[in-house]
Image (cartoon, rainbow, N blue to C red):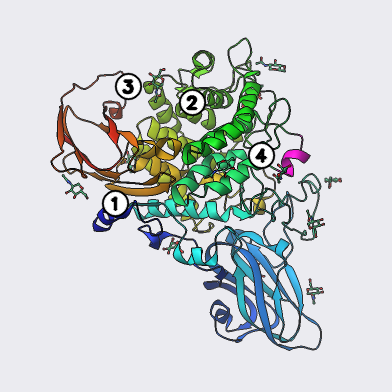
């Protein structure tokens, strides 16, 4: 608490240090060593020495292999020294890389292609040699590293290191002093780890822009072919004009995708505020707009070589432009891209037909199935981009709502489908297409009733749990005023399964998996291909900051803001971040007898509102401006509970708003006086 008060005071002048740096997973130096030995096959002396700086004691005797564990997901270029070789013939050392321990094997890496596995890197070794992988053989994501020796004789190795190649735009000095500008903390350690893993994973997905694209076999190697030999792999395509680019996954695809940025950009905003790298990444999509206004499904080379257009991903680019502007307040950026934006939006509108809804005619989306026709996800996303188009919302509410299940149907194709998708229903809440708060609560409960042991299912993609779409369900829960359900979803899906299951990296999140807990993702035929560091799975990082700690910017990098915390059963949450207009922070604590104690700080020259929810008949509200003496204003609230016809107690909740506050340091106490 003391450190928080200090931070608030210093926040205007200090940008380097943020509290809770002990949770940060970003390496302090680019030179990494494995943290432990996971397994030894054959005879290897002192295998553990390769995890230290000790000189040459690890000896591979005859055919043998060691699997090293970095303890978390890492990326980069491998190097090692060979001190001695005692062998009758030529000797070889091979290295391979694995994300999930499920795929450790004696032949090579896990996979990037639709079938088979990726080759190990092999060197013919001599005494005194130093061996380093070529730049295009930087592996974009692994937790385990195998070292193989495949001949008779002895080879002594030392200095097995990995040069960390992610986030290349930061210098070694910046890494040493810490690159995070935002922080988060609450009393639940698992939720803290989820927040910091999301922040870290967006860094793993920020790559050297000249080392992109791992889909080199797209359309070449197919799932039916019988591949027996490990496949070559490399990452050497220039995907943006910046020095660094935000891609979907570290290992794969290493491409710029607008859908992934929808989740990652807010995550980067609240953790490192690296908006310039994001702008360069978005620019590489916008330059590919065609004359009709269509924006690409993905960046180069995929977006130009594969003739696929996606209605939803096109709209996601528009939301990404909007977010870039919201988080930076860069008017030039908006002006510069305004024609692109308008043309693209008009193109989307041209799909609206006599039903009042858009009829989607291309199926490409986030690898869900059956995207087409008057689809609820597509129309909710369009409505999100077109807040004013009330008619569209009315049409969808009439045609697609299924009152029996309290969920929207996927589309109105006859005979009516029984598929009620997670994506469309979550987006209907986020976009407020429901036009009504009760319906939002009902949807959120109906989605929750489908949760299984391993998370929230996305039936629109088969037997799938999608961390991407669940990121939208998470937001939808807070927006529907069900924060406890949001915290529960975070624990279940991101904490218990994606962090703590032993098949995971304990530091990054998988891109998709099966509802039965298998690491199988329905759209892929090759399980080792699944990415374990996919930026689209980082939803909790921004969501916990925006909705848990309630720290939101509502215009131009925070010229206006909203403080609307929802603890959801947690006892205290702290968060902060920095933008071009200054530092923002909030600390929220539950009061013993009901209510909230919120201390927050926003920059001078800004303005904003506070919105607090409470359950109870009477409450008092005290707003103190800590920058002025004796400024406390007290308001007594004594509204009667609104009785609504809903099943949930959570609806008997009231909202109190304090508008028109100027930037500064505040304490707000909302004390519930009676819990009738
Ligand atoms: C070590 O041996 C086990 C058991 O045969 C095998 O599953 C594993 O893939 C081997 N590890 C390496 C790195 O070769
Ligand atoms: C060891 O691996 C190298 C590189 O893949 C290969 O050329 C060599 O034939 C292998 N030797 C044996 C004995 O398997
Ligand atoms: C795909 O696999 C089938 C069956 O093995 C094979 O006949 C076909 O040539 C493959 N196609 C490509 C593009 O490799
Ligand atoms: C990438 O590397 C591969 C294999 O070395 C090479 O064939 C290809 O031309 C390179 N591509 C670019 C864009 O440099
Ligand atoms: C780099 O910028 C040029 C000029 O705007 C553009 O033609 C090119 O497509 C850009 N490259 C990438 C990878 O975005
Ligand atoms: C604002 O956006 C423009 C256009 O994209 C860009 O050239 C400029 O560098 C940006 N300004 C800042 C301060 O980032
Ligand atoms: C409507 O939804 C169902 C279920 O997802 C799907 O099978 C069907 O193809 C969709 N209709 C269109 C036109 O895409
Ligand atoms: C959507 O458009 C396609 C192509 O024009 C047409 O075949 C289909 O009937 C339309 N779907 C609906 C639901 O109107
Ligand atoms: C959602 O739409 C309804 C009806 O237009 C409106 O009353 C409500 O304020 C909107 N909610 C939000 C969060 O914008
Ligand atoms: C959240 O999980 C707790 C513990 O399992 C449970 O008691 C509570 O009812 C759940 N709340 C919601 C809204 O899901
Ligand atoms: C997972 O990582 C955390 C640090 O983020 C560490 O405290 C914990 O021990 C790790 N768990 C396992 C099982 O390695
Ligand atoms: C509210 O929190 C602040 C900052 O942590 C603390 O100083 C203050 O005593 C708390 N007030 C109440 C009523 O709990």
Residue 38, above or below 646: below
Mark 3 or 1: in front is 1
Residue linked to disc 2: 428
Mark 1 highlights which residue?
8
Earlier in the chain: of badge 1 and badge 4, it is: 1
Q: Position of residue 403 (x, y in %)?
A: 45, 17
- Residue at 58% of width from left, 86% of height from top? 55
Badge 4 is on which residue?
285
- N-terminal of the pair, mark 3 or mark 1, is 1
Separation of disc 3 and disc 1 at Cα?
41 Å
Pick the front one: 607 or 266: 607
Q: Badge 3 is on which residue? A: 646
Q: What stretch is highlighted in magenta?
A: 300-307
Query: Residue at point 58% right, 80% down?
Result: 47
Res 565 quadrant in image: top left
User: Is residue 88 in sight in this rendering?
Assistant: yes
- Ligand 9, what quadrant? top left
Q: Is mark 3 within 8 Å of ligand 10?
A: no
Comparing labels 1 and 4, the label whose residue is closer to the camera: 1
Q: What element carries label 1?
A: helix
Q: Distance between the residues labelled 1 and 2?
A: 37 Å
Tag of residue 511: none
Earlier in the chain: of badge 3 and badge 2, it is 2
Left or right of residue 83: residue 268:
left
Return the x and y of residue 591 as percentages of the image width and height: 19, 43
Residue 275 colored magenta?
Answer: no
Image quarter of the C terminus: top left
């Amino acid at each position: 608490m003391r450190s928080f008060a200090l931070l608030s005071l210093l926040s205007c002048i200090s940008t380097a240090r943020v509290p809770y740096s002990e949770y940060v997973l970003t390496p302090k130096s680019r030179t990494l060593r494995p943290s432990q030995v996971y397994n030894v096959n054959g005879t290897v002396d002192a295998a553990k020495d390769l995890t230290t700086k000790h000189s040459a004691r690890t000896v591979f005797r005859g055919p043998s292999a060691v699997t090293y564990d970095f303890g978390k997901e890492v990326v980069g270029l491998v190097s090692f020294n060979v001190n001695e070789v005692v062998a009758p013939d030529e000797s070889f050392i091979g290295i391979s890389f694995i994300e999930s321990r499920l795929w450790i094997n004696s032949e090579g890496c896990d996979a990037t292609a639709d079938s088979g596995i990726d080759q190990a890197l092999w060197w013919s070794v001599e005494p005194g040699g130093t061996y380093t992988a070529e730049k295009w053989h930087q592996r974009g994501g692994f937790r385990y590293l195998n070292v193989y020796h495949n001949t008779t004789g002895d080879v002594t190795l030392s200095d097995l290191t990995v040069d960390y190649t992610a986030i290349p735009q930061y210098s070694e000095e910046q890494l040493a002093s810490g690159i995070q500008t935002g922080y988060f903390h609450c009393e639940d350690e698992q939720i803290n780890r989820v927040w910091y893993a999301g922040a870290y994973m967006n860094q793993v997905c920020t790559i050297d822009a000249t080392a992109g694209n791992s889909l080199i076999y797209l359309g070449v190697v197919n799932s039916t072919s019988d591949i027996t030999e490990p496949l070559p792999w490399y990452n050497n395509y220039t995907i943006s004009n910046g020095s660094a680019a935000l891609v979907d996954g570290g290992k794969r695809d290493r491409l710029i995708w607008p859908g992934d940025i929808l989740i990652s950009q807010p995550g980067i905003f609240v953790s490192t505020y690296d908006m310039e790298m994001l702008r360069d990444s978005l620019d590489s999509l916008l330059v590919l707009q065609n004359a009709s206004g269509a924006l690409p499904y993905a960046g180069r080379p995929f977006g130009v070589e594969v003739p696929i257009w996606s209605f939803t991903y096109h709209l996601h680019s528009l939301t990404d432009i909007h977010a870039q502007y919201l988080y930076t307040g860069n008017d030039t950026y908006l002006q510069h891209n305004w024609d692109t934006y308008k043309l693209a939006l008009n193109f989307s509108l041209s799909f609206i037909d006599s039903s009042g809804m858009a009829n989607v005619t291309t199926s490409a989306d986030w690898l869900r199935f059956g995207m087409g026709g008057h689809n609820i996800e597509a129309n909710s996303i369009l409505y999100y981009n077109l807040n004013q188009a009330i008619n569209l919302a009315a049409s969808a509410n009439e045609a697609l709502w299924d009152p029996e299940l309290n969920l929207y149907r996927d589309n109105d194709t006859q005979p009516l489908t029984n598929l009620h998708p997670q994506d469309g229903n979550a987006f209907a809440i986020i976009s407020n297409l429901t036009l009504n708060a009760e319906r939002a609560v009902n949807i959120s409960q109906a989605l929750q009733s489908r949760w299984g042991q391993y998370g929230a299912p996305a039936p629109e993609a088969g037997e799938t749990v999608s961390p991407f779409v669940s990121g939208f369900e998470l937001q939808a829960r807070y927006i529907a005023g069900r924060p406890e359900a949001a915290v529960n979803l975070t624990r279940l899906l991101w904490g218990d399964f994606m962090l703590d299951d032993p098949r995971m990296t304990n530091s990054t999140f998988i891109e998709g998996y099966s509802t039965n807990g298998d690491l199988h993702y329905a759209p892929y035929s090759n399980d080792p291909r699944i990415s374990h560091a996919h930026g689209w799975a980082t939803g909790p990082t921004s969501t916990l900051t925006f909705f848990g700690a309630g720290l939101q910017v509502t215009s131009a990098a925070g010229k206006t803001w909203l403080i609307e915390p929802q603890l959801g059963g947690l006892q205290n949450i702290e968060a902060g971040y920095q933008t071009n207009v200054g530092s923002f922070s909030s600390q929220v604590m539950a009061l013993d007898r009901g209510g909230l104690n919120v201390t927050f700080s926003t920059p001078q020259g800004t303005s904003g509102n506070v919105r607090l929810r409470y359950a109870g008949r009477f409450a008092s509200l005290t707003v103190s401006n800590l920058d002025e003496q004796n400024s406390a204003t007290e308001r007594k609230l004594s509204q009667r509970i609104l009785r609504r016809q809903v099943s949930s107690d959570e609806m008997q909740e009231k909202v109190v708003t304090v508008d028109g506050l100027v930037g500064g340091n505040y304490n707000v106490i909302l004390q519930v006086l009676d819990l009738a």
